[in-house]
Image (spheres, coloured by chain):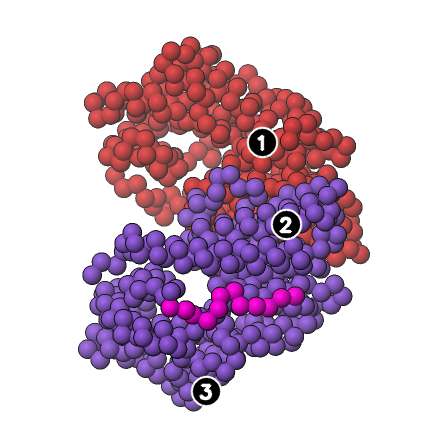
Chain colours: A purple, B red
């Protein structure tokens, strides 16, 4: 089968994204209008924003332009006498991101000074007190690494025969959760240094309501299916099972309470807003299996080729496509898709404890 | 012949660069020690530098580390009670630069926050009053474009049969000079907005003493030889002469006086220092023809392939290698190589006129 998306698939896909973007836009606009206090910021000539986990566009450009428009409106309404500042935007992603492509795609008519910033957002990547708004969409549910225990055959948290915690035992889930907590603590600690007092963080990430089974979030379902396809390929002798055992996906879907607990441990940010950016999954929004498979393939192919070699991917994704089709009734009945939108404000009177 | 540099060539080449780097390092250290006034800068948490025309490293990393060391020393000596600031470094080059390679090459133990900044330094690329030190080495002698007249058959400045002004008539030289003036004015105007009051620009670029023939600077000799090789290839019928006519190299070697005149026209910078970074060329430093040819090929191959197609490059550079060998006696006798090192300081009481 052809793996490229056809025109109707693309339209469907674009429509799904469009809806996501429109919802995010509305939430970001409201957050800036209600929660950004210009008074604390007007002393600066330059308003600095960062998009963390920006990938290569165009979504990052849409998000950034929206933020700038909302900040301009806020200046005009709250401080009409003050000069609108200049805008500088930092596009951040891992060093392996294709920044060359990102840079050639930058909108020609942009109203900001653009810079690329390579490096993990789990570390300090900006100078102290230098960012007014931090935006991160669909990025902070990715972990900095796979928890070591799940790939250790001698650990009770060994995740043999699986590539994700979706259907795993408690020990595996605890290992993923511990890594999530560690990473989120590091993320918040780094940003506590970098965000100006009164500055905002606008975060959109996958989440599940407390009490939801880990086998229900759509992302988890997809990773679990991919794992079972890899095991099928292994059983045919095309790859060895140990290769599957040593491949895990560093992705954790927290509950709102788990994220909130991290913010409270950190202590430098107040939670100004926390709500669903997208409700429980509804059937009208369920794309067809081909779109799901193509989407996952686009996102995972590089990683899979690196680990397993390039020969298995066609066979793997044909299998995957079939399994997704079989799962559609379950997804319609039990699958959950929730993105949490959280607005954090850097508190004025708290210093981060750790440098 | 093989175009890769052999080990002894590489050593010779590295030695030449080493010497350039050591000279530049000494000049930059002196300039920062003598001309940077920390008092005006300590209010900022972050010390921001930019390397304009950084290419892909490693020279840019060496230059940047040297600047940071010198600034730290200056803080310690001039303002021992003040906290050493954090450093942020912007690596700038054209959007077509390989930033992916640059980012993966960033020193792991760097003491600064790194960002890549794509775009022409002839335009505004940074926010107002945001840079403390600007460094540009071997970049500002490149023009933003080839002057249009030299490729217009109906213009008196038409440069038919040549790819550079080295041996051209006065009209061609005037067209190049006009483009240089326009570009340097735009460069200084943009930086006048971006550099903080009291901030420094450390510029190293090719220059010729007033009264030197345009056929004497080594860079010009090389471009002229390359042009004559292209005409030889055209005369063999492998490419057409019109292709050569429409290929010109946007590179201008100014006199110190020409650069100084641009600084005076601009009015926002004082010239704190202006001296040869490298004296008139001496025989001990003349690499062999193979190194010259390989160096030029490395720098020009992409541009040549894009304009002429890929088939001619081996033949072209074999010819070029022979011609360089023939020219060695002339180069030893008359060739000039001078790099000018200029330190500019942003004056405190002048606003740029143009936005």
The residue at the point 62 percent across, 24 percent down is: B262
Query: Which residue is disc 1 drawn over?
Result: B187
Q: Is residue A169 left or right of residue B347?
A: left
Closer-to-camera residue (A324/B82): A324
Query: Which residue is disc 2 drawn over?
Result: A71
Q: What residue span does the magenta drawing correspond to?
A: A272-283
Residue A276 part of the magenta segment: yes
Quadrant where the image shows the C terminus of chain A: bottom right
Using a 10 Å C-alpha cutoff, classify the residue at mark 1 as few (fewer than 14 neighbours), some (14 to 19) or many (20 or more). many
Q: Can residue A333 be seen from the camera position used here? A: yes
The residue at the point 31 percent across, 72 percent down is: A328
Please identify, in this view, whether the residue under mark 2 or under mark 3 is nearer the observer: 2
Image position, residue A139 (x, y; %): 49, 64
Q: Are marks 2 and 1 in contact (CB under 8 Å)?
A: no
Query: Which residue is disc 3 drawn over?
Result: A171
Q: CA distance from mark 1 to mark 3?
A: 60 Å
């Amino acid at each position: 089968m052809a793996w490229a998306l056809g025109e109707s698939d693309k339209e469907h896909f674009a429509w799904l994204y469009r809806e996501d973007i429109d919802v995010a836009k509305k939430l970001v606009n409201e957050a800036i209008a209600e929660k950004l206090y210009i008074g604390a910021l007007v002393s600066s000539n330059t308003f600095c924003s960062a998009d963390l986990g920006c990938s290569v566009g165009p979504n990052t450009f849409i998000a950034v332009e929206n933020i700038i428009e909302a900040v301009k409106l806020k200046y005009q309404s709250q401080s009409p006498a003050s000069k609108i500042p200049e805008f500088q935007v930092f596009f951040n992603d891992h060093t392996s991101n294709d920044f060359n492509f990102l840079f050639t795609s930058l909108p020609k008519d942009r109203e900001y000074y653009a810079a690329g910033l390579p490096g993990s957002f789990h570390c300090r990547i900006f100078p102290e007190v230098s960012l007014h708004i931090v935006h991160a969409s669909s990025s902070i549910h990715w972990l900095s690494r796979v928890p070591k225990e799940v790939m250790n055959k001698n650990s009770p948290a060994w995740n043999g025969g699986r590539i994700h915690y979706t259907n795993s035992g408690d020990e595996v889930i605890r290992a993923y959760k511990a890594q999530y907590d560690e990473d989120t603590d590091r993320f918040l600690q780094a940003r506590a240094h970098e965000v100006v007092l009164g500055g905002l963080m606008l975060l959109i990430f996958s989440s599940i309501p407390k009490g939801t089974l880990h086998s229900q979030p759509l992302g988890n379902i997809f990773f679990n299916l991919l794992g079972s396809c890899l095991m099928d390929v292994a059983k045919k002798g095309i790859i060895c099972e140990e290769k599957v055992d040593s491949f895990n996906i560093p992705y954790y879907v927290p509950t709102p309470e788990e994220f909130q607990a991290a913010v409270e441990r950190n202590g430098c940010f107040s939670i100004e807003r926390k709500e669903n950016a997208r409700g429980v999954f509804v059937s009208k929004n369920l794309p067809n299996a081909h779109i799901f498979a193509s989407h996952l393939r686009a996102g995972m192919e590089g990683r899979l080729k690196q680990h397993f070699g390039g020969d298995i991917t066609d066979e793997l994704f044909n299998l995957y496509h079939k399994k997704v089709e079989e799962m559609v009734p379950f997804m319609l009945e039990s699958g959950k898709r929730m993105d949490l939108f959280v607005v954090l404000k850097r508190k004025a009177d708290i210093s981060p404890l750790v440098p």
